Image (tube, rainbow, N blue to C red):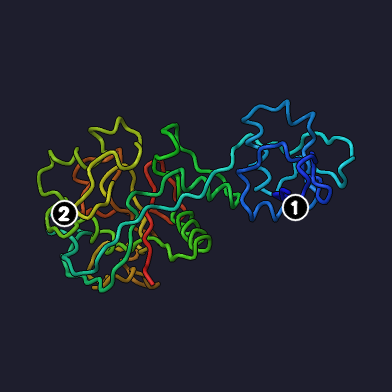
Amino acid sequence: MDKCPICKTKIDEKKDYCPTCAWEFEYYFDELSIEERERYKDRFKIWNGIYTKLTDFEKGLIVSNLSDKKVLYSDESANESKKTVSNLSTEKKLPLVEPKMVHIRGGSFMMGSDDGDRNEKPVHEVTIDYDFEIGKYPVTFEEYDYYCQETGEAKSSDNGFGRGKHPAINVSWNDAKNYAKWLSEKTGKNYRLPTEAEWEFVARAGTTTKWSFGDNENDLKEYALYDINSSFKTHQVGVKKENQWGVFDMYGNVWEWCEDDYVNSYKITPKNEIAHKEKSGFLLKVLDKKVLRGGSWCNLAYVCCSAYRFSSHPYSRGIDIGFRLLRTLP
């Protein structure tokens, strides 16, 4: 005796359908999880005459739509006449892809640069007294598109550069915050944007030079996608060398949002890992802008370094702006 995969009723092998829920056994629903089968156990049935005429791709969409809670075919009894096709999506259901993370040990480092712009000064010591994990790569369209599909958020444009493993672009600071909050709730893990100090700590990877690999600008093309080697578009993450801590794309490809409010001097910023939150009335506050780090595919080499700072409004989106996630550890 076999069991119905939907309602678990014991079925004679000679039966074509379950007498309890009317599920027809000849169809290919191995992709449905136990949870999905339980959710849709109440009298789902796909009429044979229509189903057998669908392409394999369309059959795959049916399974996807079942997990989307869209009823393609249904009946209240095994003898009901056929139903017409409805709600057949043209978009295949995407899987959840969590970001790959790299474990980072806490420590102290010198933040800023005496050789850079005014907003990179003064150089000051920052202590991060805990371990954390940071995204091995910027968040990709593969990851972000799933979030949009699940929440109904509009997908951001890729500007024709490509989706999949390309970094997600046209994502505002607010968008990035919402994604981190959603992913935290989805997985039970504590994802967030990195603070500016945490970002630079990882970018430097224990060094005090302009880049994590040293001060020779000619070596940057081995680690970053920027104006001279990007063909003025994003590229898939991870195609260049990682830094000493195993993190990719800290320079170039896309700018990365940080948690902090932007100020044009380090004189009033925290001396620890805490994100800077500007108070009203400070003259150095610049129109509620948020910090961006790392440079992008369209920037010059001097921009794509460990200390360079940029900013934009939290609602701003751009074809060169993405983000990376950090995860706090229990």
From the image, tell me which residue sits under label 1.
41
Choose between 96 and 78: the one closer to the eye: 78
Q: Is residue 8 visible?
A: yes
Name above or below for residue 221 compared with residue 188. above
How many numbered badges does the structure rendering display?
A: 2
The residue positioned 53% from the left and 60% from the top of the image is: 186
Residue 39 sits in quarter: bottom right
Choose between 282 and 13: the one closer to the eye: 13
Choose between 229 and 36: the one closer to the eye: 36
From the image, tell me which residue sits under label 2.
116
User: Disc 2 marks which amino acid?
Assistant: Gly
Residue 188: x and y in percent read 49, 65
Name above or below for residue 123 compared with residue 324. below
**How far, Cα to Cα, is label 2 from label 1?**
64 Å
Residue 168: x and y in percent read 43, 44
Name above or below for residue 75 compared with residue 290. above
**Lower sequence index among marks 2 and 1:** 1
Residue 165 sits in quarter: top left
Name above or below for residue 303 compared with residue 265. above
The residue positioned 14% from the left and 52% from the top of the image is: 210
Residue 190: x and y in percent read 43, 66
**Mark 1 neighbour class, 10 Å CA radius: few under 14, some 14 to 19, many 20 or more:** some
